[in-house]
Amino acid sequence: MKFPARPFAFMVALIFFVTLSYSLPFIVLHGIGDECSNHGMKHFTELLSDWSGSHGYCIEIGNGAWDSWFMPLEDQTQVVCEKVKQMKELSEGYNIVGLSQGNLIGRGVVEFCEGGPPVKNLISLGGPHAGTASVPLCGSGIFCVLVDALIKSEIYTDYVQAHFAPSGYLKIPSNFDAYLEKCRFLPRLNNELPARNSTYKERFSSLEKLVLIMFEEDTVLIPKETAWFGYYPDGVFSPVLPPQQTKLYIEDWIGLKTLDDAGKVQFISVQGNHLRISHDDMKKCIVPYLRSQDSGTGRARIIEAGGDHPRNSRIWRLREMMIKDSFVSTWGRPFFGETVGKIEIV
């Protein structure tokens, strides 16, 4: 049976138009001490949506700033995993934009999330991918004093690992054995444990693009090259190895070398301190990996996600005490001081 030429041509054109107009959405995972409702995060997500024509969703975890500090990263990852599985908007695939600590959660979703929608591109801004050798600086407020006191205890103890998120990626070169044995998140994420997990490597190396953005004047990540997977040799604090000279890359524990060999990794360096980025750099370094083929305007939304602390825990009681004593009027200031995981657009 012959179809009339014009209707057939119309159908082909319609299918072609729909294909070109499809916009792959993206999610944003903020850094430590930040939250999706903050002006900077909302503005960042909205700009990326407007410039790329893709729908953007900032995924919040629990109480936002508080839980970014005190919920273990494995739990934060699970919260995001469950959220993206519930979002119909992401069912055909999506991109991740990670900020600082949010990158480790994003990679955790890629490697650990069972049954989740496929992640296409991972765009990382200042991510501590190979760990950090120092506790993130956060200022001189009461919160920072408490953090410093907590860190002076054993960072690799079970209690600190269970109640202080950055302990999951603190990698002290001079205490490497304790890191491998007791650190609960990064050794698993980076497939550093002796029993390598081939599934983690398979999932990570399935990314279409991995964009690693390092801030040239970064004073938060130690060393700054961790944003590219560079780090110190085991046991010493110098020199800083470029990513291609690390065991993780050479032995291809998570598929970073596989991705790089296939031309799927972009190592990008931008001016500025941690998470301080210009409009021009956003347009050059992030938007091309989010942009849909359609030139339409995207939209930005905040997605709430659950998570809390047991009310009988020491962490919860500390929080309640601070609220009663008026240390916290609004999350972020003055309690958090100048926190390190907040995006600053310049």
Image (cartoon, rainbow, N blue to C red):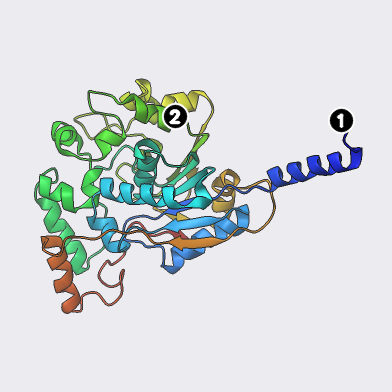
Q: Which residue is mark 1?
A: 1
**Which residue is depicted at the point 36% across and 59% down?**
305
**Which residue is depicted at the point 20% across and 79% down?**
326
Image spot of residue 31 (x, y percent): 36, 55
Is 290 on the left or on the right of 122, as rendered?
A: right
Image spot of residue 270 (x, y percent): 49, 47
Residue density around tag 2, few if under 14, some if 14–19, many if 20 or more, within 10 Å: many
* Front one among 21 and 28: 21
Q: Is residue 314 above or below residue 22?
A: below
**Which residue is depicted at the point 26% across and 29% down?**
192
Quarter location, residue 50: bottom right
Q: Is residue 344 above or below residue 102?
A: below
Examine the rendering and report whether any part of residue 100 can be seen.
no
Residue at the front extreme of this rendering: 1
Q: Which residue is mark 2?
A: 205
Element carrying mark 1: loop
Image spot of residue 126 (x, y percent): 40, 47
Residue contact between numbered discs 2 and 1, judged by CB atoms under 8 Å: no
Q: CA distance from mark 2 to mark 1?
A: 47 Å
What residue type is disc 2 on? Ser
